[in-house]
Amino acid sequence: MEKLVKVAGIALPMLQANIDTDQIIPVPEMTRSSEETHERWGAGLFAYWRYVRDREPNPGFILNQEPWKRAVILLADRNFGCGSSREPAPRALRGYGFRAVIAPSFAGIFFGNSFRNGLLPVELPIEQVRELARQMEAARGHAEVTVDLEAEVVLAPDGQVFKFRTPAPLRRMLLGGLDEIDQTLQNIDAITAFWNRDAAKRPWVYAPGLADQTDAKGV
Amino acid sequence: MPKPQTYFEKVWADHAIIPLGDGSELIHVDRLVLHEWTAGWILPGFEAAGRKPARPDLVFTLVDHLIDTAPGRGPNQTHAPSGAQIFDDARRHIGKLGLRFFDIGDARQGIAHVVAPEQGIALPGTTLVCGDSHTCTNGGVGALAWGIGNSEAEHALATQTLPQAKPKTMRVSFEGTLGKAVLPKDMILHLIGRIGANGGIGYAVEFAGPAVKAMPVEGRLTLCNMAIEFSARYGFVPPDEVTYDYLHGREFSPKRAAWDGAVTYWRSLLTDPEAVFEREVVIDCTGIAPQVTWGTTPQHVLPIDGRVPDPSEAGDPGTRRQIEGALAYMQLTAGTPIAGVPIDAAFIGSCTNGRLSDLREAAAIVKGRRVAAGIQAVCVPGSTAVKKAAEAEGLDRVFKDAGFEWHESGCSLCADMGNKRFARRRVISTTNRNFEGRQGPQTRTHLASPATVAASAVAGRIVDPRPFIG
């Protein structure tokens, strides 16, 4: 699991509501190869909007413009990452070079997938997202936003500090670059105890199609 | 006296293994469903890392996403460029791990969220996860079901658990009765139009009220299917006699003494009368007309007599920007009546509306009529069992006689899995997403109920289905 403590750099404003994961990475970008590199995933990012034909860059799309193409933080409006559960969505953002997305709200599956792919989703009120966008646009991109996961703060170019919160288990995982499966397997005794307790209460869960109590298996 | 609880709170408590901080819990996964795309993607690495499934007995695998649905398809037929490799990886590793597998040719094959309730895999008060956002469909039988990414799928396979943040609770009550040719799809589209595509973020949503009580399980599955389209974490209908009648006797439902014990347990989970929800939404169904989307998010929805909106009337800049983008993409102008917009294609199927009752609604309209000239009309049953049942009552003939293609089951043209036949077309579809490019490059999708799609296929343009019903 890739770790992230702090990121600072250009924040690209894309203040549109409901940007869905089909836009972040279209299905054809996920089926074109089985490579698992940053380059491969980054190339598929926003493919419908970013390319015109034969992967010619669309000059009208902000990600193809200087200095925004060097952005490491994305600013968006509410419900970012809605739709499909595809994990390549945060992978494409990370693969391109983004390390954080700041928006008033995120769709839940995308939110969790991001932490597992070295990308930090930061929830801030829309007024604060707009303020960051305003400062970045005023500086024509030549300014820095800092996102500090340890302190759970965003630092605006003008020095304003915006606080945010992240769920403890996901924060620990991203700060430490921890493997989530290994973390959970440390609790295998608690899981086993749950199975034994629960199989007495809900025996039918542990033997799909079960007819009699005696067929149920705890461990 | 204990604090009154909602259905969700009781189910959550019965799955919580250990607290992880900030209200997050390690939650037990009762049923893990893997389709071929997730399986083929994660299993080679899972095995290479030396991982073992924690509870292979609680895992179900099947083929739905990448398989072509053309009539008479072969077991490896796909339009996805890397599809053959994914099928191969999936089959090899599923076989090595000895997991239950509903492959092509198995009578239980079909779209994961059609199959799981149909086979009694999804049950009331269970948790069920699958690598597909529409897993929430299973809430229609009272399961707490949600879509996951590939990393979570590996985690669920290795540990039979997932860390989850505890959501807030919402109840959506559908009051009143539905009008003629107004279906569960119209109810859920109407709700999304009302509370927005972000209206459910962070919520576990209980669907309730007389219109839900009166609804068969298949309609409830449609309702819950689109909970993800307003970004709800979970959407479900707590079980009742309708649910029990539906599930009883299915292959993986408990039997005999185990069934009786399960029903007693399920009854204990129902929301206490005094329980408080953090948000309540009430919808009066009586006035709901057939719904159809005009834009590129399910919240861009109109009653069939509505007109495409003007971006200048949007409340905030983020919404205005999305409406402007949607109008350009959909090649529509503000103020256009949505009824009358000419279409190129019609699609019936998907985990939203690919069940037998959906096919019956559509067939009742196309029966004795013909699809308009030049319209591609495709009907894809949601599972092999649905296909067989439909054929047994002659629905395949009704569709074929009307000029529809009659396919094998699978996800098909709901998403662009490499089949480009809807590229640059305007499609009216019973699916769940009208996102840009969702059904193909530059495809313009209008979401609607099976009745509205069937009527529009016949008319060659978007129409009100009500005059088609006798």
Image (spheres, coloured by chain):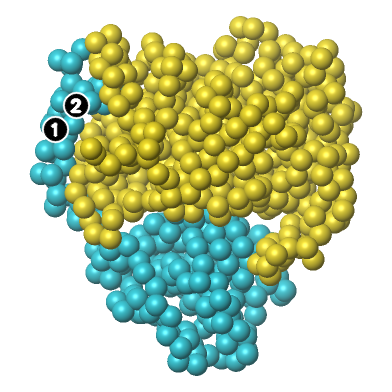
Badges 2 and 1: C-beta atoms under 8 Å apart? yes
Residue B280 in the image: above or below residue A79: above
SS state under label 2: helix
Q: Chain of mark 1?
A: A
Q: Chain of mark 2?
A: A
Percent position of residue B108, x then y: 45, 19
Where, quadrant-wise, is the N terminus of chain B in this rendering? top left
Q: Amino acid at mark 1?
A: Arg
Percent position of residue B311, x then y: 78, 62
Q: Amino acid at mark 2?
A: Lys
Q: What residue is rendered at 23% in x and 34% in y? A: B55
| Chain in yellow (letter) | B
Residue bearing the label numbered 2: A201
Q: Nearer the viewer, residue B28 or B47?
A: B28
Does the rendering let one see residue B387? yes
| Chain in cyan (letter) | A
Judge from the rendering whether residue B113 lies leftward or rightward of residue B350; answer left or right. left
Q: What residue is rendered at 25% in x and 32% in y? A: B56
Judge from the rendering whether residue B271 lies leftward or rightward of residue B324; answer left or right. left
> Splitting the image into 4 quarters, where does residue B284 fall?
top right
Q: What residue is rendered at 69% in x and 31% in y? A: B286
Q: Nearer the viewer, residue B457 or A94?
A: B457
Q: Nearer the viewer, residue B431 or A179?
A: B431
Badge 2: residue crowd in 10 Å (few <14, some 14–19, many ≥20): some
> Splitting the image into 4 quarters, where does residue A122 fall?
bottom left
Residue A24 in the image: above or below residue A9: above
Q: CA distance from mark 2 to mark 1?
A: 7 Å
SS state under label 1: helix
Does the rendering let one see residue B29? no
Residue bearing the label numbered 1: A197
